[in-house]
Amino acid sequence: MASASRRKVSGRPMKARVFVTLKPSVFDPQGQTIADALHSMGYAGVGDVRQGKYFELELAAASADQARALAAEVADKLLANPVIESYRVEIV
């Protein structure tokens, strides 16, 4: 079976960083476990811990705005679950 078609985009190479985290209203059991472990290790100054995912995308785009839009499209369609996660894109 053929894979999904790939868009060929001309432009200069750019890198996008995509940070995906659970929405604040969603309980983060992994973050809670990390916080509990840190407290048991004596890190009393650590409050809430939220964990997430980090992606680096190498993109070809004509501008930073186009690269940001492409990275956001990828995050919307594949990297983040919009029901429980939010994301942030940085172009570097």
Image (tube, rainbow, N blue to C red):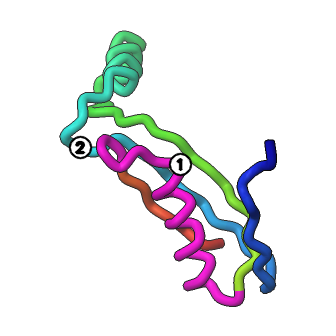
Identity of the residue drawn at 54% across and 68% down: 90
Mark 2, secondary structure of its residue:
loop
Relative to 35, residue 52 above or below: below
Q: CA distance from mark 1 to mark 2?
A: 18 Å
Relative to 59, residue 48 above or below: above
Q: Nearer the viewer, residue 31 or 58?
A: 58
Mark 1, secondary structure of its residue:
helix
Q: Residues within 10 Å of mark 2 (few under 14, many from 20)?
A: few
Identity of the residue drawn at 35% across and 23% down: 35
Q: Position of residue 16 (x, y in %)?
A: 63, 66
Residue 70 forms part of the magenta stretch: yes
Q: Splitting the image into 4 quarters, where does residue 15 fall?
A: bottom right
Residue 76 forms part of the magenta stretch: yes
Q: Position of residue 72 (x, y in %)?
A: 50, 66
Left or right: 36, with 7 as reference point: left
Q: How many marks?
A: 2
Label 1 is placed on what type of residue? Leu
Task: Point out the stretch of residues depicted in magenta.
Answer: 62-85
Identity of the residue drawn at 79% across and 75% down: 8
Q: Position of residue 79 (x, y in %)?
A: 53, 48
Residue depth check, mark 1 versus mark 2: number of the one nearer the observer: 1
Left or right: 53, with 60 as reference point: left
Earlier along the polypeptide chain: callout 1 or callout 2? 2
Q: Residues within 10 Å of mark 1 (few under 14, many from 20)?
A: many
Quarter in which the N terminus is drawn: top right
Identity of the residue drawn at 36% across and 10% down: 40
**Residue linked to disc 1:** 79
Q: Splitting the image into 4 quarters, where does residue 34 fall?
A: top left
**Residue linked to disc 2:** 24
Label 2 is placed on what type of residue? Pro
Q: Position of residue 82 (x, y in %)?
A: 35, 49
